[in-house]
Structures are given as C-alpha cells and as structure tokens.
Image (cartoon, rainbow, N blue to C red):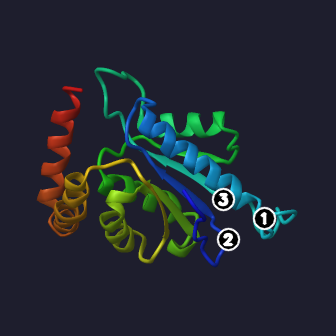
C-alpha cells in the first residue's frame, strides 16, 4: 500500500465505502489495508495522549444490502464494520446501510457528518482506486469541499479502470444534476441486485 497522505487537520471521520456483502479475497485485502492505515493514523503523535483535543475519529461504513439472494440480511456496511472490528479497529461506528450506489454512499455520509459539523477536509474516504475520480467529484459536490481519499488497488483490468474513470464519472456527474438519472440508476441497481 505504501505511505498514506494524511490531512493537515486530524480526521474527525473515516468513511469506508463497501463493495460486496461477502469477504472475497479482494474485499479482505481492501479492508485489511484500511485497518492497517487506520492503525497507523492513530499512532501519529497528534492522537497520542490527546483524547480531549484530538478524539479518535468517527468510523462510517457505507453500503446497502446489495446481495439479497446470496447474503440475505447482510449489508456492505456491516461486512466492513465487522471485519474492521475483527482486525482490532475499535472506533465509534455508524453504519449507513441504505446506500446502493456511490452517489447514495456519499449522500448518506453528508447526512451523517452535517449535523456533527464535520468539514470535508476533516474526512478521509477509503475506496477503490479505479473509482477515485468519480468519488472525488461527487464528494466535492455533496460535502462542499475536498476530503482526503485513501485508495486501494482492487486488481481491476485496464478496461474496468477506464469504464470507472470515464463512464462512471460522467454518469455520476449527470446524476448529480438530473434527478431522473439518479432515480433510473437506483431502479437498475435494485433490479440487478435482486438477481445476485
């Protein structure tokens, strides 16, 4: 994974975007990398012995029930939260189990951090490296600022990367502006997920 760029401010929220309701080898590698990076972050001097000044960040895991046939009652948010806890990440955790798309993930995050007055530059988002551009674009719009992204290699093919970096970004940019595109996306995801 290599060293991570940490924000200048101490992060107040760590967001982990979910990708599957099963612990596949790719998901395990992703979540293990996230756990390692959180552990390294919490060892930084700004966190040592400063619970009153720099309390540990809030952990937000995001992802809905995307595999209802093969994993009934299991959300991506739950898979992330439980695996991180098993790896020793003990932080106050909020699960957003409603999200089925990147847009919904980040809308849910905005709804959680807004009332807590957590600013975009106090947020770290852990995500798939191939989706970096679209997550950064959507996060800037919905969080009104620039969060830090920690990205992880999911072993995507060149074609998969190009689709996410171009078509995925264009689609989510359109969905931000056109509510009917977002609704159509939601219906398609529900249809697809019913077959998983």
Q: CB atoms at circles 3 and 2 under 8 Å apart? A: yes
| Element carrying mark 2 | loop
| Mark 3 → mark 2, Cα distance in angstroms | 8 Å
Contact flag, marks 1 and 3 (Cβ < 8 Å): no
**Left or right, residue 147 beside residue 132:** right
- Ranked by sequence position, the earlier of labels 3 and 2 is 2
Q: Which mark is in front, 1 or 3? A: 1
Kindly identify the residue that appears in the image at 46 percent across and 31 percent down: 23
Residue 126, given in percent of the width and then of the height, sits at 49, 56
**Vertical order, 144 against 80 (above or below):** below
What residue sits 32% from the left and 68% below the top? Answer: 133
Within-10-Å neighbours for mark 3: few <14, some 14–19, many 20+: many
Q: Quadrant of the C terminus?
A: top left
Measured from the top left, where is residue 173 in percent x and y?
21, 68
Whole-percent x, y for residue 58 in the image:
62, 55
Is the residue 172 above or below the residue 190 in the image? below
In the rendered structure, which disc, 1 or 3, sits on the residue that comes first in sequence? Answer: 1
Give neighbour class at mark 2: few <14, some 14-19, many 20+ (Cα, 10 Å): many
Q: What secondary structure is marked by label 1? A: loop
Q: Is residue 42 left or right of residue 143?
A: right
Taking the image as shown, residue 45 lies to the left or right of residue 190, namely right
**Residue under pointer 2:** 10
Circle nearer the N terminus (1, 2): 2
Identify the residue under disc 3.
Answer: 57
Residue at left offset 20%, top offset 46% = 186
Image vertical order of residue 140 relative to residue 179, above or below? below
Q: Secondary structure at mark 3?
A: loop
- Asked whether the residues under the numbered discs 1 and 2 touch, taking CB atoms below 8 Å apart as contact, a structural biologist would say yes
Which residue is disc 1 drawn over? Answer: 47
Say if residue 109 shows up in the picture. yes
CA distance for labels 1 and 3: 10 Å
């Amino acid at each position: 994974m290599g060293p991570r760029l940490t924000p200048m401010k101490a992060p107040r929220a760590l967001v982990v975007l979910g990708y599957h309701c099963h612990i596949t080898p790719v998901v395990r590698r992703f979540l293990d990398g996230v756990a390692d990076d959180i552990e390294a972050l919490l060892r930084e001097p700004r966190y040592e012995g400063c619970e009153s000044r720099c309390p540990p960040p809030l952990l937000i895991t995001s992802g809905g029930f995307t595999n209802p046939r093969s994993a009934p009652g299991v959300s991506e948010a739950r898979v992330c939260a439980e695996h991180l806890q098993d790896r020793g990440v003990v932080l106050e955790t909020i699960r957003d189990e409603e999200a089925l798309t990147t847009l919904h993930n980040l809308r849910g995050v905005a709804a959680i951090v807004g009332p807590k007055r957590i600013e975009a530059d106090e947020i770290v988002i852990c995500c798939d490296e191939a989706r970096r551009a679209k997550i950064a674009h959507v996060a800037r719009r919905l969080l009104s600022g620039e969060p830090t992204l920690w990205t992880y290699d999911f072993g995507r093919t060149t074609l998969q990367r190009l689709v996410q970096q171009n078509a995925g970004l264009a689609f989510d940019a359109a969905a931000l502006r056109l509510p009917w595109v977002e609704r159509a996306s939601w219906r398609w995801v529900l249809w697809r997920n019913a077959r998983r």
